[in-house]
Image (spheres, grey):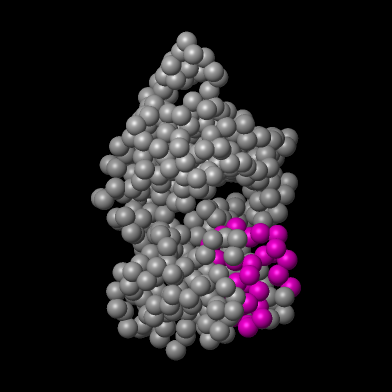
Amino acid sequence: MKTILILGAGLSASSLIRYLLQHAEAHNWQLKIVDQDADLLASKINRHPCAQALTFNALDSKERKPHVAHADLVISMLPAAFHVEVAKDCIALGTPLITPSYISPEMRALDAEAKAAGILIMNEIGVDPGIDHMSAMRIIHEIQEAGAQLESFKSYCGGLIAPQSDTNPWHYKFTWNPRNVVLAGQGPAACYREAGDHKYLPYQRLFQQLERIEIAGYGAFDAYANRNSLSYLETYGIQDIPTIFRGTLRRPPYCQAWDFFVQLGLTDDSYQMDGSVHLSPRQFLNAFMPFDPERSLEEKVQQRLAETPQLVDLIEHLGFFDDTFKIGISNASPAQLLQAILVEKWKLMPGDIDMLVMYHEFRYSKNGKTYKRISSLVVEGEDERYTAMANTVGLPVAIAAKLMLTQQWTERGVQLPVYKEAYLPILQELEAYGITFNEHEIQL
C-alpha cells in the first residue's frame, strides 16, 4: 500500500481528493488528509475507507515530520510560503513532493539536495502555473520540431464567473484567494518583451495598458500584464524570441474600474488606518478623496470618473456610498478594508458556476511564410465545490501523483512540467475531464 499525505483540504483540493479517492482502491493507495477544519475534512472524505482525516498543525515541522516519514508521496496544498519548509522535510526523509505553486528562489536552491536525496519535487503543476506551461510547451515543441522559428508567444489566463452566474456589473466573483486578487500586480514592475525591446509596467499603470482578447462564443476579455514574463524565456527554452507576454484576463470594464482603486490608494497594504474599525464604506472611500465641503462624495467620484461615467455604477454597486454600517476591522490596511467589502459583494452564491479561461497566441515563420496559431481553453465548474478552479488545479496535481507513484517519471530534483514525459500524459488524461484546448491556425 502507498500512502499519500495531503497537506491542506481547502477549495483547490476538492477535485484532487475526489480523483485520488476514485483511484485509491485500484492502485492500493491510502490517503492521509490534513486540515484543521474537521467538518471540512469529513465532508470531502465522506467516510471513504481509503482515507484518514488528520487535524494536526501542518505548518509545524515537528508535528508534520513523523507523517512525512511514513508517506510515499506528499502533496502540499498549503499557502505557497510554507512549501520550502515542507520540501526540506521531504528531502531529509526521502519523500517525493508535489506543489501547485510557483517555484521560489529558495525552492529552486534545493535542487541539488533533492537530487542527492533521490526524490522528485514537482512544482507549478496546477493551472496557472501548470496547465499553462504544459499546453504552451506542447505547441512550442511542435513548432520547433517542424523546423519553424518562433517569433512571438503571448499567454493569458483568468479565473472568472460563468455567463449564467454573471450577476454584477463588474462581471467578476471570487473563485480564488480574495487577498491575492486585491493585491494583484503589486511589487516589482511587470516586465515583458515586445519586438525585441524590454518593456516595464509599474503598478500604477498596470490596469491602464490593456490588451483586448476575443474568444468565440464567450466574447471580449481584457488582459493586464502578469508579473515577470521574461523569466519564462529560459523556462521554455525560447531565449531568442522577440516577443513574450503573459497576462491575466478580466471582463471589461473590470480593469478600468479597478484602476480607480489603485490610483486612489485603496489597494495599499503597507500601513494601518487610524480608527479603521469605525469606518463605514462611505467614510473609507471619502478618506482618499479631496476635501471639498461643497460637493458630496458622489459628486467627487463623478468628477474623477468624468471621462468614464459608466464606471460610477460599478463603485455604487459595491456600496461605497453607504454610511449605514461599519466595516468593522481594527488596525486594518486600506487593502484589508477593500477586501472585506468585496468579499460580501463578490462571493459565490449557491448554484453559481465559475469559469477558467486560457488563451495562447503563437506567431512563427517557416519557409518564408508567417503563421499565427491560437490555442484557447474555457472550463466551467460543476458546482460550488468542484469549481473550474478546483478542477484545473486539482486534476493535474492528482494525475501527477499517479504518475509518480506508478514510477512513470524518472526525473529527480526540483522540476517543472515542461518536458514531454511530464506534460503529454497529463494533457491527454485531462481531455477525459473536458479540459480540452481548441486550436486553429492561419497564415498571415
Residue 285: percent from left, percent from top: 48, 29
Residue 7: percent from left, percent from top: 49, 71
Residue 58: percent from left, percent from top: 52, 72
Foreground: 244 or 354?
A: 354
Taking the spot 55% from the left edge, 52% from the top edge, the residue there is 136
Screen quadrant of the C terminus = top right
When the figure is inspected, residue 90 is found, relative to residue 354, above or below; the finding is: below
Judged left or right of residue 22, residue 82 is right
Asked if residue 334 is among those painted magenta in the image, a careful observer would answer no
Magenta span covers which residues?
A: 83-112
Quarter of image, res 121: bottom right
Quarter of image, res 61: bottom right
When the figure is inspected, residue 313 is found, relative to residue 374, above or below; the finding is: above
Judged left or right of residue 437, residue 237 is right
Taking the spot 50% from the left edge, 45% from the top edge, the residue there is 330
The residue at the far bottom in this view is 1
Taking the spot 44% from the left edge, 89% from the top edge, the residue there is 1
